[in-house]
Image (cartoon, rainbow, N blue to C red):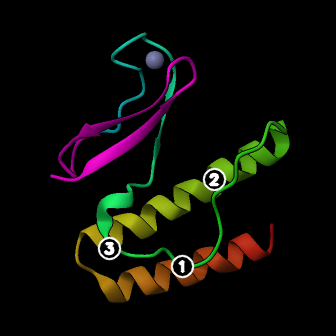
Amino acid sequence: MPIYEYKCKNCGEFTKMQKISAQPLAICPTCGGEVERMISKNVGVVFKGSGFYTTDNKQIKDRARSLNKERQKDNQALLDGDVGGYVKQADSTDKKVSGA
Ligand SMILES: [Zn+2]
């Protein structure tokens, strides 16, 4: 099972082992705060391109969030062993990122 990394607004980053098919956590198991899932570093592949942003600007944050979602699709394709699909998806994400 892959280990997913989450970021809690209150207590920071933590990891959780979950099935690929499992729903991502929305609530921190420690404090009940809002969490966001990050792309796992344990996939063993260097992700192409940029696309992850951290910022306090609300507008950019919304944009970054949608781009991060695209990146999760990249990741999912990869986890499914669909390398061709991954490359295609990553390329389309790169286009969206450069248009940001
Ligand atoms: Zn927390």
Q: Nearer the viewer, mark 2 or mark 3?
A: 3
Marks 1 & 2, CB-CB < 8 Å contact: no
Q: Residues within 10 Å of mark 1 (few under 14, many from 20)?
A: few
| Quadrant housing residue 46 | bottom left
Tell us which disc is closer to us: 1 or 3: 1
Query: Could you tell me which secondary element the residue under label 1 belongs to?
Result: loop
Q: Which residue does the image show at 21% across and 41% down from the upper left?
A: 17
In the rendered image, residue 31, in percent from the top left (x then y), is placed at: 42, 10
Q: Is residue 87 left or right of residue 61?
A: left
Q: As drawn, which residue projects farthest toward the bottom?
A: 84
Q: What residue span does the magenta drawing correspond to?
A: 1-22
The type of residue carrying mark 3 is: Leu
For ligand 1, tell me if the residue under mark 3 lies within 8 Å.
no
- The residue identified by callout 1 is 48
Separation of disc 2 and disc 3 at Cα?
19 Å
* Circle 3 SS class: helix
Residue 78 bears which disc, if any? 3
Q: Amino acid at mark 1?
A: Lys
Q: Which residue is mark 2?
A: 66
Is residue 4 covered in magenta?
yes
- Between the C-alphas of marks 1 and 3, the distance is 12 Å
Q: Residue at x 65, y 64 (%)?
A: 51
Vertical order, 96 against 29 (above or below): below
Which is in the foreground here, disc 1 or disc 2? 1
